[in-house]
Image: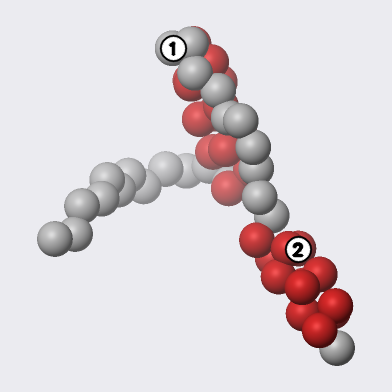
Amino acid sequence: MDYKYKKKINLSFNEAVSRVKEELKKEGFGVLTEINVKETLKKKIDNIR
């Protein structure tokens, strides 16, 4: 089974992330951590070389 929600918006990625954080805060939630996958993978690859 494939479950997902999808909505097209006219915001940049960073604007969308900020907006989601604001809306979560209004409801008493928040983001505990953020992971930059591109940066993390680059560090791991650089360590292997």
Give above or below for 44 relative to 17. Answer: below
Residue 6 in the image: x percent, y percent?
A: 30, 48
Q: Is residue 14 left or right of residue 30?
A: right
Label 2: element kind: helix
Residue at 69% across, 65% down: 38
State the residue in front, 31 or 21: 31
Question: What crowding class fits label 1: few (fewer than 14 Cα within 10 Å), some (14-19), or many (20 or more)?
Answer: few
- The answer to whether residue 15 is seen in the rendering is no
State the residue in front, 24 or 49: 49
Give above or below for 4 relative to 46. Answer: above
Q: Which mark is on residue 15?
A: none
Give above or below for 12 relative to 43. Answer: above
- Who comes first in sequence, dot 1 or dot 2? 1
Residue at 19% across, 59% down: 2
Residue at 66% across, 50% down: 35
Residue 24 in the image: x percent, y percent?
A: 48, 21
Res. 40 image quadrant: bottom right
Q: Is residue 40 left or right of residue 28?
A: right
Q: Which residue is mark 1?
A: 27
Question: As shown in the figure, which amino acid type bears the numbered disc 1?
Answer: Glu
Q: Is residue 29 left or right of residue 39?
A: left
Label 1: element kind: loop
Question: What crowding class fits label 2: few (fewer than 14 Cα within 10 Å), some (14-19), or many (20 or more)?
Answer: few
Q: Marks 1/2: CA distance? A: 31 Å
Res. 49 image quadrant: bottom right
Q: Which residue is mark 2?
A: 39
Question: As shown in the figure, which amino acid type bears the numbered disc 2?
Answer: Glu
